[in-house]
Image: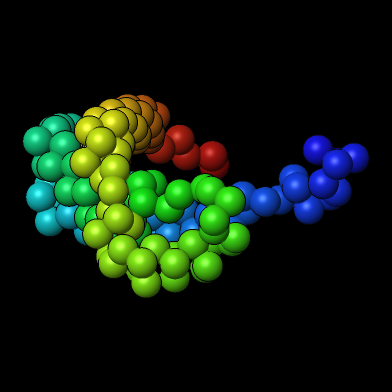
Amino acid sequence: MYTSEGLVSFYSGLTPVLLGLTHVAVELPTYEYLKTRFTGHGMGEGSGEAHWFGILSASMLSRILASSATLGKGGIVDNRKYRGSVMTFRTILQEEGWRPLYAGLGSNMMRAVPAATVTMLAYEYIMRFLYCAKQEGQPKSTDTKVNHE
């Protein structure tokens, strides 16, 4: 690639990748907000009681909202007709309207929502485990203090 197209060829997909980060910027805050609303526990808070349905609901809804708001990963086509992300976006809007930008959103949801749900459930399980381990490692308030006189 370097010999035929130069150093720039290694960065040809950088713009779409960076635009994909907006997905995370929508999903994670939405997840934390919904989790707090559904379970009553905010970020980093743990409890002895698991709220799996609330966590499951928050993770699914946050992924659906983020994918819908940021065009998921469907719609943008890499073709010789399109040069760069901005030109691709404009060309699709002018020639076909906004609907093709969401092409593939349904199949993306079928793949991405379960993956996000498993990720968030694993995250919450690990955080709960660490919280319980931290609580068990804390000295009890009823412990007698050693007096060094």
Q: Quadrant of residue 56?
A: top left
Quarter of the image that includes the N terminus: top right
Q: In the figure, 98 relative to 81: above or below?
A: below
Task: Evaluate whether residue 142 shows in this view.
Answer: no
Q: Residue at x 43, y 53 (%)?
A: 76
Q: Residue at x 49, y 62 (%)?
A: 88
Q: Decide which of 48, 66 is in the foreground and name it.
A: 66
Q: Decide which of 50, 111 is in the foreground and name it.
A: 111
Task: Evaluate whether residue 110 shows in this view.
Answer: yes
Q: Residue at x 36, y 47 (%)?
A: 74
Q: Is residue 8 left or right of residue 142?
A: right
Quarter of the image that includes the C terminus: top right
What count of labels does the image hold? 0
Q: How is the image coloured?
A: rainbow
Q: Is residue 76 left or right of residue 67?
A: right
Query: Residue 58: where, in percent of width, then height?
Result: 18, 46
Q: Decide which of 63, 33 is in the foreground and name it.
A: 63
Q: Is residue 115 left or right of residue 8?
A: left
Q: In the figure, 73 relative to 81: above or below?
A: above
Query: Residue 13: where, in percent of width, then height?
Result: 61, 50
Q: Residue at x 52, y 48 (%)?
A: 78
